[in-house]
Amino acid sequence: MCVRYVRSAGGLALIALLAGCGTALPKGGTFHPNGTDQSPLTRPASSSPVVSGSPAPSAMTTPQLNKSALDAYRAYQAAYQKAYQTNDPSGLSQVATDPLLSVVTDDIEKVRAKGEIWQFYNALNPKLQGWTANRSTTWVLDCVWTVALNKFSARTGKLLQKMPTGKKYYQVELRYGPDGWRAAQAKWGGKC
């Protein structure tokens, strides 16, 4: 779930995607771009973050709201990781909305145009930070630990670059709509 913000003259400006991005690699330090990832660390994104028959956020108890929003956040993170590992952002529309959806999709297109695939694994520790009065918007704060982040050639599978890893704060705004929770905005903070 990687969108990076950096300080500019006007404050924080979104420039790229990076978060901590990495997954377990096969022996030899390469992966097979035309094969399938059998890593136990890779979890498929949920097809829908909405549970049939679940109440609207305004009717949820605080524990229900907490679980619902954090489940949606985790589904976003799983779809985000899969999108980079396959260079296919199509699954993100089930868990994200604009402006974040367009930002991440554009970045994946740039990565694909360079002939790269990013393999990464993020360990998550999210907490619900707050919500609006009607509970239709929530904020998740996470200390994301990027355990591994590597760039590979999409053509050959050769390892191109090992990227720095570590722990950073990550805040995501989730908005509730007819199709459930969607990640709408995100920003990186300092080390945690």
Image: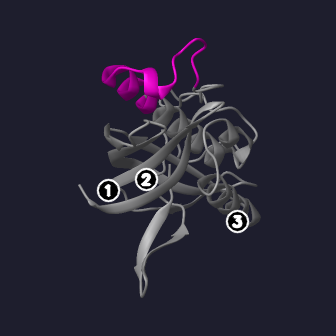
What residue sits 58% from the left and 23% below the top? Answer: 50
Reading the image, the residue beneath label 1 is: 168
Image coordinates for residue 15, horizontal then vertical, percent = 54, 72
Reading the image, the residue beneath label 2 is: 20
First-in-chain label (1 vs 3): 3
Q: Does the magenta stretch include residue 52?
A: yes
Q: Mark 3: which amino acid?
A: Lys
Relative to 164, does residue 71 appear above or below in the rendering?
above
Identify which residue, 85 or 179, lies in the foreground: 179
The crowding category of the residue bearing disc 2, from other C-alpha atoms within 10 Å (few below 14, some 14 to 19, many at least 20), is many
Image coordinates for residue 146, horizontal then vertical, percent = 38, 49
First-in-chain label (2 vs 1): 2
Q: Mark 2: which amino acid?
A: Gly
Reading the image, the residue beneath label 3 is: 110
In this view of the protein, can residue 51 be seen by the observer?
A: yes
Which corner quadrant holds the C terminus?
bottom left
Q: Is residue 84 magenta?
A: no
First-in-chain label (3 vs 2): 2
Instruction: Name the residue furthest front.
Output: 133
